[in-house]
Amino acid sequence: DKFATDKAVVIPEKTTDGKIIDSIGDRAFNLDTFGENGIKYLTLPDTIKSIGTMAFRNNNIVHLDLPDSVEELGSGAFASNRDLETLKLSNSLKTIPNGAFTFTKIEKLVIPEGVTEIGDSAFSENNLLSDLVIPNTVEKIGSRAFWNAVMIDLTIPGNVKEIGSDAFTGGKLSSLTLEEGIETIGNRAFKRNKLTEVTIPKSVIKLDKSTFDRNPNININYASLIEILEK
């Protein structure tokens, strides 16, 4: 019940003895179960560079603005903040770690330029996420990264070399653009969506037969085969 009465937390730039606060430790504000007693309003100073593993798990944060000073997040840093409606990520992040933002109410998400990896289950069970922008800097999307998100259309840039298993399982995709450059698409990566047509780029070297399971009536085209036929 440590935040039962005052649900607003402001992290200061300095400690009382004048030391700069540049990190928040593992499980610093972690709650063991999700309820109504967590932090609702969180203000972070632009001195913070790292936020530890499960630091704010199971809280009630509604709007989260990570200052651009933040370079590193721990696994599950903001997992299961089930009241979270808006998220602005730091432009200094390179990796969004495993399970960082599971179970939220985010509807729109812009992954910042500079991020190279989206970890396993990073945004899993974001059941209202309908608008997703993936920048050209991303090279890997982890397994279950966007499990049960509800985007209708999506473009995955060619810089993404690997799309993990179940990455977009359980969605509402009806339009999917896979750009030339993608190499590996994992098991069940787009299972249980609403795709009727998709073109596999020539660059793909690994594609599992389960990748598009349970997309009734899907027509899978292969860019390399289309090129041969057109010759």
Image (cartoon, grey):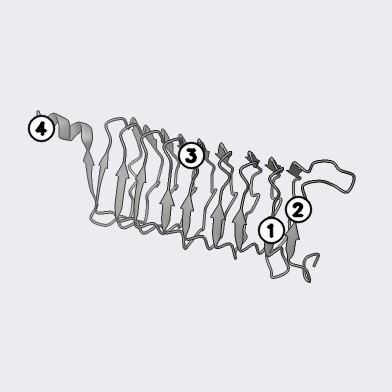
Q: Is residue 223 above or below residue 216?
A: above
Q: Is the residue under label 4 in contact with that under label 2 (CB below 8 Å)? A: no
Residue placed under numbered mark 2 in the picture: 11
Q: Earlier in the sequence, mark 3 or mark 2?
A: 2
> Along the line of sight, which residue is nearer the eye, 49 or 122?
49
Give the alpha-carbon distance from disc 1 to disc 2, as whole Å.
8 Å
Label 1, residues with CA under 10 Å away: few <14, some 14-19, many ≥20: some
Q: Earlier in the sequence, mark 3 or mark 4?
A: 3
What secondary structure is found at the residue carrying circle 4?
Answer: helix
Give the alpha-carbon distance from disc 3 to disc 4, as whole Å.
37 Å
**In percent of the image, x 30 and y 56: which residue is there?**
174
Amino acid type assigned to the residue bearing label 2 in the image? Ile
Label drawn at residue 230: 4
Quadrant (top left, top right, bottom left, bottom right) of the N terminus:
bottom right
Residue 177 in percent (x, y) is at: 30, 45
Residue placed under numbered mark 1 in the picture: 42
> Along the line of sight, which residue is nearer the eye, 51 or 12?
12
Give the alpha-carbon distance from disc 4 to disc 1, as whole Å.
57 Å
Q: Earlier in the sequence, mark 1 or mark 3?
A: 1
What secondary structure is found at the residue carrying circle 1?
Answer: strand
